[in-house]
Image (cartoon, rainbow, N blue to C red):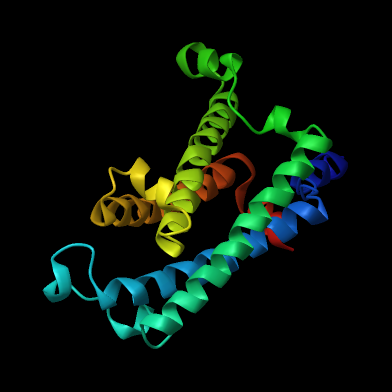
Amino acid sequence: MNAPADSKKSKSPPVPAQSVPAKVFHWVNIISLVLMIGSGLQIYNANPVFGGRGGWKIPNLFLLGGWLAGGRHWHFAAMWLFALNLLWYGFYILINRRWKNRFVSNKDLKALQNSQNVKRKTYAWHRLVYTAIIPVLLVAIFSGLGMYKPVQFNWIVDCFGGSWQAIRIVHFTTVPIVVAFALVHSLLGLRVGGTRLIQSIFW
């Protein structure tokens, strides 16, 4: 007699549907970030940001490019891929109004303070983190362009007090922040929809 009820309880929830553009965006982001980090560490090894030429070196296992010039070629190619991917996806969420559900609002801030609904607070944290990473990505691209073409974009270097070391430190600091964002972004996704949600973003 209880079989129908038991079968309903045992049914798995439907797999969340993700748009093709969202899947492409996440795949390109991961690929370009891995390329940028590996090639960026190759550039770092040529002249470590911390400690000068005698500073701490990154093991070759994590490097991409083989040498300084090779690392630069890979890094800036991946940078353009990453930047253009952010640009087209920004237009995409703007045109279809998905941005309304992506960024933090006053309602989310109030939910973080007062809501007793765990899922609602998780969504609010997700939007807060999603919003906070935008200026970090802009600073990463901005400082990267300044190092890429310091003569043509000398005004960017001037924004960092004209200090080459300052712009390198700022650019290098954005890397662990972006990696931390990716981890938190994934953990919040797991908390809301489990592994099925994460899988739906890529497959």
Vertical order, 53 against 186 (above or below): below
Q: Quadrant of residue 52?
A: bottom left
What percent of the width, then of the height, locates residue 55? Answer: 14, 71
Q: Residue furthest bottom?
A: 66
Vertical order, 161 against 20 (above or below): above
What percent of the width, then of the height, locates residue 197? Answer: 67, 50
Task: In this rendered view, identify the residue nearer to me: 178 or 69.
Answer: 69
Q: Is residue 37 visible?
A: yes
Residue at the image point whose x is 45% and y is 64% from the top: 148
Asked if residue 44 lies left or right of residue 183, the reply is left
Task: In this rendered view, identify the residue nearer to me: 70 or 130.
Answer: 70
* Quarter of the figure with the C terminus: bottom right
Q: Quadrant of residue 146?
A: bottom left
Asked if residue 100 lies left or right of residue 59, the reply is right
Q: Is residue 64 visible?
A: no
What is the number of callouts on the image? 0
Residue at the image point whose x is 32% and y is 49% from the top: 170
What percent of the width, then of the height, locates residue 111? Answer: 54, 16
Vertical order, 39 against 173 (above or below): below
Q: Quadrant of residue 3?
A: top right
Residue at the image point whose x is 21% and y is 76% from the top: 57
Residue at the image point whose x is 27% and y is 78% from the top: 46
Task: In this rendered view, identify the residue nearer to me: 114 or 93.
Answer: 93
Vertical order, 80 against 185 (above or below): below
Asked if residue 54 lies left or right of residue 114, the reply is left
* Quarter of the figure with the N terminus: top right
What percent of the width, then of the height, locates residue 122? Answer: 54, 31
